[in-house]
Each structure stands twice: as structure tokens, then as C-alpha cells.
Amino acid sequence: MTRQLSIPAIFTATLLLGGCMVGPDFVRPEAPYLDSWTQGASGLPVNSKTGFTSRSEAVADWWTLFKDPTLNAFVNEAYQQNLQLEAAGARVYQARAQLGIARGELFPQQQQGFADGKYLSISRNDPFVQEAERFVDLNTNFTRYQVGFDAGWEIDIWGKIRRDVQSAKANLAAKIASYDDVLVTLTGDIAVTYVTIRELQALIAVARNNAALQKKSLDIAKLKFENGTTTELDIDEATARYNDTLSIIPELEGELAEAYNAMSVLLGETPGKIKPRMEKRYARMPIIPAQVAVGVPADMLRRRPDIRAAEYRAAAQSAQIGVAQADLYPAFTISGAIAVSSKEVATLFTKNSFDAFINPGFTWNFLNYGRIRNNVRAQDAKFQELLLDYENTVLKAYAEVETSITAFFKAKQQTVYLYRSVKAAKDAEARVLDQYRDGTAGYDRVLDAQRQIFTSESRLVSARADVLTNLIAIYKGIAGGWIPPNVKGFVNDKTRAQMEQRTNWGKLLESAPDGVDQPES
């Protein structure tokens, strides 16, 4: 009776202990605190003439604020075609499958059904058979049929498997946050590349316009030389300046071709299709919004996917400490089998053919504490590293936004001065050219005036591009972490079809409801 009661007693005890989990429970780490944007060393106040406002509003589709249909189309196409984004989505589905593996370990880890039929013929010359036949007439030829099922289960008393599930869930959440981060980066890269293309187109136009202006002054110098009112030196200087300006155009066109190809890669298409689309309309810079809603730093911490990913990676590693600590304690297992066996198929599934056994037990690596304890320490040190990485990610995010706000405002100030410089240079060039025609000014003053126009106009174009790129950096810093409405799941239809054709993914390729992929705290 004692032997019969021991099995259910052990089983009940192990189930009662099953709620225990060793290792630390993850708590969201405290982030470095910043109560408001101070613009770093610049001291620029928010909600002033800088154009910034501290109101918090939805800025998910921030690129639409530039009111540029071509840019909007590029962003939408990239969400469906960019290969790096597709790869990030595939990593999400990989993490989902790994979470399924971890959850499966909560159930019997060894499961096997078996069936066999055997015909045995034993040698009558076998000494054991000969000895047995002294007492009984032994049949040395017989048949046996057997059908059954066996299983082995390591009971999760110390929470090792449940901690591993926690780790897998946090890892999945980190992959989703990393996908969002790729999405944010992709959108910013498209916008910056678009601005770069428009900047180069504008610089080429400036160079051509200035070359035309310099050609006009060269013709005047030639006419004055023919009339004997100037020397050939003026023609040489005008020719050198004119050709020097022309030489800049091929260099800019080469950079423009490189920018076109960069945009093609971002859109996941072969080169050659971007140039016609960006030359159909007048090449102008996107419109700069009158005000920029930067919100407060706390909004950024909730939205930025790189910060969320750093938090989830720490959560995943925290659970691994418990997985390592569980090895310090004995592992309890239950194994068993159920089968039917008979010498005839007809009697295989009768009452007397039933076989079964159950085998509770435990294993304990009590002589390996040095190895196991050091593994716990290694996992804990890695967790501490990820906590510090989280804090550093927050600090870098603060610095990025602060720097971008300052750079945006300074670039806007620069454009004001350069607008004035361009106007004054054009007025000066018109006056000095009239004086050169009249013979009251030397050609060196004409060259200086034209050089100033080219320099000021080129700098103005670059400054306007800097305003836009810094504004893009602000939006990236404060508005990341969303799934646009045209993004269904983590891969596009083409990629999903390829994966489903190779493997039965079940429902894993569907979008998860809110909260399913969040780590446990």
C-alpha cells in the first residue's frame, strides 16, 4: 500500500511546488530623467520664435507635413518593397516560432508512439534454453505484437521553463520594436535622400544660371576687346571663370546619379526608375512647416522603438538568470508508458494485453556548483550590461533630439542671412557690370561680384537642405514607433506567399492583437 500511494503523493507534491520560480522578476528600469527640452548648450526656449511648440500631438505621418506628393509616394512604396524592412519582419516571425518552441517545453518533452511485430526463433542449443527444457517443454518459436505510447516530463518546479517562455516573449517584443526602428530609420532615410536629390538638382540649376550669367559678361569682354576699350586679359579671366563654373556641373550630376541609385535601393527596385519620376515636376525643396510640435521628453520615451527594444532585451536577459539558477536545484521528472502486447493480433486490444508503468525520479548536478554558479553570474552580468545599454540609449536619444532642435534653428537663421546675401550680390553684380560697360570699373570687380553670387546662392540651397534634414532628424527622434495603416503584418504579400509555400505557418503570419507580444514584468 505504501508503494502504491507514493506515486500520486510525489505527483501532487510536484504540482504544488510548480508555482515557484527562481530568479529575479523583471522591473522596467528607471530611465534618465529630462523634464523639458532645453536645446542643450544653445539655450533656445521651446514655444517661442524658434517655431517649436511643446504640445504633444500625433505626428506618425510626419513626412506628409512637407506637402510633397512624390515624397509621400516614395514612403508608401518603401513600406511594401524595402528589403531590410522585410528582413526585420522575417526576424519577428522567427521569434514567434521560437516562443512556440519555449511554450511547448511546458508539456511532456518526450512523446513517442510505437508499434511493432516480432517473430522470434531461439536456438535450442542455447545453454539457457537447454537448462529450461529439463523442467518444461519450451516453445522456442513465437510471435509478439505491441502497440503503445511513452512520455517523459520534466516538471517545472523551479520555473526554469516558464522563465524561458518569459525570455522568448520579451525577445519577440524586442524584435517587433526593432522592426519599428527599421521602419523609422527607413522613413528618415527616404526623406533625407529625397532632400539630397532636390538639393543637388537646385545646385545644378544654380551653376547653370551662373554659367549663363558669366557667359554674358564674357561676351561683353569680347565686344570691348574688339572695340579696343579693354585688353585680352579680361577675355582670359572671363573664360577661366566661365569654364570653372561649367566644370562643377558634371561633378554635381555624378552625385545626383548616386542619390538616385540610393533611393532605388531604399525602394527595393532596380536603378533607373527614380530619375524620370523626379524630373517630371519642377525640382523644388519640400515645404518647411511653420511650427514643429516636439512634445515633452516623456513622450519620446514611450514612442521611440530603439528605447523599447533595449528594455525588452533586458527583460529577456533577466529571465535567463532564473533559467540558470534553476540548474542549482534538482530536476524532477516523470516518465512512463502505456502499451498493449499479445502473441496474436486478435487478442491485442483485450483486457489481459494491457501493459503500463510510471517512473518518477530526479537528477541533481550537486557536484557542479562552480560551473552552474558562474553561469548564473555570467547571466547576471549580461543583464546588468543591458540595463546600462538601456540607460545609454535613452541618453543618446535625448542628445539626438536636442542636437537636431538646435541645428534646425541655426540653419533657419543661416537661411535668413543668405537670402539677404544673395539679393545684395545680385544687385552689386548688375551695377558693376554696367560700370564695366561704361569703363568706370575693372573686370576684376565683375569677377568678384559673380563669384559672390554663385557662392551665396549655393550656400543658400545647402542651408535650406540643412533645415529640412535637421527637421527630419527631429521627427525621427520624437515620433518613432508606429505601424502605418498600409502596413499589414510584418512582411508584404509576396514574402508571405513565399513563406507559406515552403512551410505551414498556421496563424503565426497573422498580425498579433495588442498586448500579445509584450514581455511580462
Image (cartoon, helix red, strand yellow):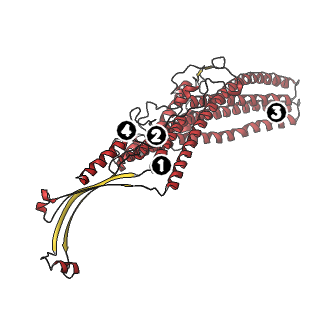
> In the depicted view, which residue is nearer to us: 463 or 49?
49
Q: Nearer the viewer, mark 1 or mark 4?
A: 1
Q: CA distance from mark 2 to mark 4?
A: 19 Å
Graded by Cα atoms within 10 Å as few (under 14), some (14 to 19) or many (20 or more), the crowding at tag 3 reads some
Element on which disc 1 rests: helix
User: Which of the two discs, 3 and 1, labels the residue nearer the N terminus?
Assistant: 3
Q: Label 4 belongs to which residue?
A: 510
Disc number for residue 170 = 2
Look at label 1 and name its amino acid.
Answer: Ala
Q: Nearer the viewer, residue 445 or 16?
A: 16
Check whether the beta carbons of the residues at disc 3 and disc 1 lie within 8 A of each other: no
Residue 276 visible from this viewpoint: no
Farthest residue to the left: give it.
346
Residue 308, how many percent across, how many down? 52, 35
142 relative to 269 in the view: left or right: left
Residue at (52% x, 40% y) in the render = 314
Task: Tell me which label, 3 or 2, sits earlier in the chain.
Answer: 2
Q: In whole angstroms, how far apart are the C-alphas of marks 4 and 3?
A: 74 Å
**Considering only vertical position in the picture, is 500 above or below 129?**
above
Residue wearing tag 1: 324
Residue type, label 2: Ala
Other residues around mark 4 within 10 Å, as few (<14) / some (14–19) / many (≥20):
few
Residue tagged 3:
222
Foreground label between 1 and 2? 1
Viewer-proximal residue among 365 and 411: 365
Pointer 1 and pointer 2: residues touching (CB < 8 Å)? Answer: no
Q: What is the x, y in percent for residue 88?
A: 48, 42
**Alpha carbon of mark 3 to alpha carbon of mark 2: how far?**
76 Å
